Image (cartoon, rainbow, N blue to C red):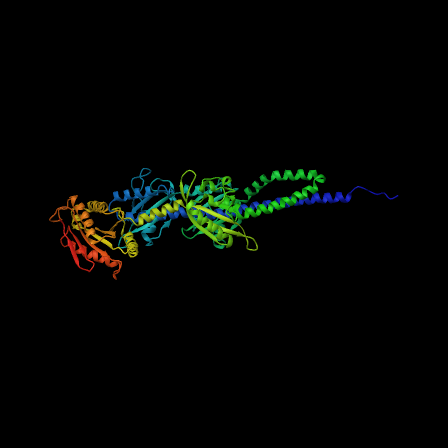
Amino acid sequence: MRRTDTRPFGTLAALLGGLAGLVLFGIWLEESARRANLAQIRQALHQSSLSLGQHAADMIEVAELTLAVARAGLLRQDDAGGVQMRLAEHMDDTADHARHIARLIYVDREGKGTASRMNDGATSIDAADLPYFRYHRDDPSTEALLGAPMMSPVSGERVIPVSLRLEGPDQRFIGVLAAEMRVDAFSTLFQRLAWLPGGLGAVALNDGRLLALFSSTPVSGQFELPWAEVIAPLARAAPGGVVQSVWEADGLSRHTAVRYFDHPAITVVTAATDEAISARWFADSKLRLFVGALLIGVGLLVTLRWWRQVGLHMESLRQLKRMEEEFRLLAEASADLIEKLSLEGVREYVSPASLQILGLPPERLIGTNVLDTLPPEERERGLAALANLRHRAETHRSVIRYICPDGRERWLETAISRLDDNRGRGTGLVAITRDITQQKLHTEELDALAHTDGLTGLSNRRAFDAQLQERRRAARESGQPLTMLMIDVDRFKLYNDSYGHAAGDTCLKEVASAIARSIRRTDFAARYGGEEFAVLIDAIDQEAAVLIAEKIRKRVASRRSMHDRNIPWGYVTVSIGIADWQPGSARDIHSLVENADAALYAAKERRNCVRTHAATGGLGSKLSA
């Protein structure tokens, strides 16, 4: 009788095969997770090299810009006291927006220097042997020089110098102006790499000299970057790429990203050790391995259900991977606010940077419309932008003024782009927002400095030329005349010869004050050049202009500021020329300046008087009382 074995060997074999397959599948999943984790870290290195490099470049460019602004002021100083005061003023101006700058240093052509703050070092500096002094002394270039770290001649701390060559009117070398940046300010930038396994960040000059270094694990004091073997080839062959190599300095295998900048000439390096990456992955995978073993132990009872869960799990992984590829890596590595929006503008994802930029945590923003956080005056424009993006795949950029919940004002720049599927249909929006408050304030501050006369506080010649064109356009639109007063301090050269340039500066300040107090709020006053001033007045005739000019002349004279060589008065006086320009005239606007100057020339023949230039080209007069 044939024996029939009713045991389900086939099913058992299938189950055992399924379990073996599950084991192999689990190994594959873990390997995929390991690779995905490695890809995430490599992408983070890539993004960090870009964002941290941009921050470092911005800090260096702020130092260069500070030096450029300070250079113009220092060239007008005649003594050491004035230099020291000007350095201190510029240092105070940069204290809020450029805290990485420790001090400003001025070195004359002999190598003797002075610093903006003297309470942390010697009161005089012998800088003749400093590398940047020798470089600018021998090299005629006026470009800023970024130097290697050195010991500060003032405080003895390690600093990174940025310097400019100073030249006189004849282009001869007269000294050097330098800004000392704190090394630890650069190191602090890389603290955000602490989350990376074995994270390391460095900023170096493009010739390999190290500027700043950060490592989440201890390194030797003699540690050097593998410049020739790894950094330089990567910067040339694949800037911004990530490679794996062994560093000879410590024998560790690292994944390394390099970002090269041409100006300023720096190279940014971010790296993570392969050993630390693997150790963290193993630590994170312990729980998964335990769960896998438990599932395999249950075996026969839960196989079918487990397969179903695997299918769901794989689908979840695909969804998660897609989301991570689109947003997560950028969001975690960037200080900018990244948001995923629906086509209607509803927030589906908000990066952690929202707390820093908008003053609101991500959980309070998810589910709200992006238009809700816009100022009322910007909402209509934002609504139109969303409607346009729903129909066309493009990028919309805007700059808005934003008020945080705590009342602080910020300026934000936002770029919104549309996400499309394979058929080109919009599936959502991505918005990237960055805080540009400091850049905007700094730009406005520099703009004010560029259009203001540093001595008198009035507008300068550049601002006058721009205002002349602006008021010409306004005069054409209104049909009203434009009048100009040209004011000159009588015998000012003799005043300087008698009382000195410091007294001359004080005199110019007093005249500027008298002008500012005598004109209307709508009028425009500027220092035209030397001891000459100019005033632009809208919509008045020459008789009214004479009254204003007389008010200025009398106010200056009433001060009775001593000027023995201004005979016969013996005190400071001014002469004023007046001309106007009619919108219907065939004359160019520059004839207004020429006529006012001609009237001033006529006034200076008698001094302490007002002369007018009639519209027909003739000269009229209004003498002093």
The answer to which image quadrant residue 101 occupies is top left
Residue in the image at 65% along x and 44% along y: 310
Please state which of residues 607 and 330 is positioned toward the viewer in this rendering.
Answer: 607
Query: Exactly how many numbered labels are in the figure?
Result: 0
**Location of residue 112 in the rendering, given as x and y in whole percent from the top left corner:** 29, 45
Location of residue 459 in the rendering, given as x and y in whole percent from the top left corner = 27, 49
Residue at 36 percent of width and 51 percent of height: 144
- Residue 161 in view: no
- Say left or right for 414 vs 421: left
The image shows residue 231 at horizontal and vertical percentages of 48, 50
* Residue at the bottom extreme, as displayed: 586
Q: Nearer the viewer, residue 308 or 146?
A: 308
Q: Residue drawn at (55%, 54%), measured in percent from left and top? A: 425
Q: Nearer the viewer, residue 28 or 553?
A: 553
Can residue 9 be seen here? yes
Left or right of residue 145, residue 35 in this image: right
**Rendering coords of residue 253 (x, y %):** 54, 46
Q: Quadrant of the N terminus?
A: top right
- Residue furthest toward the right? 1
**Residue at the extreme left of the image, as rendered:** 568
Q: Is residue 104 above or below residue 611?
A: above
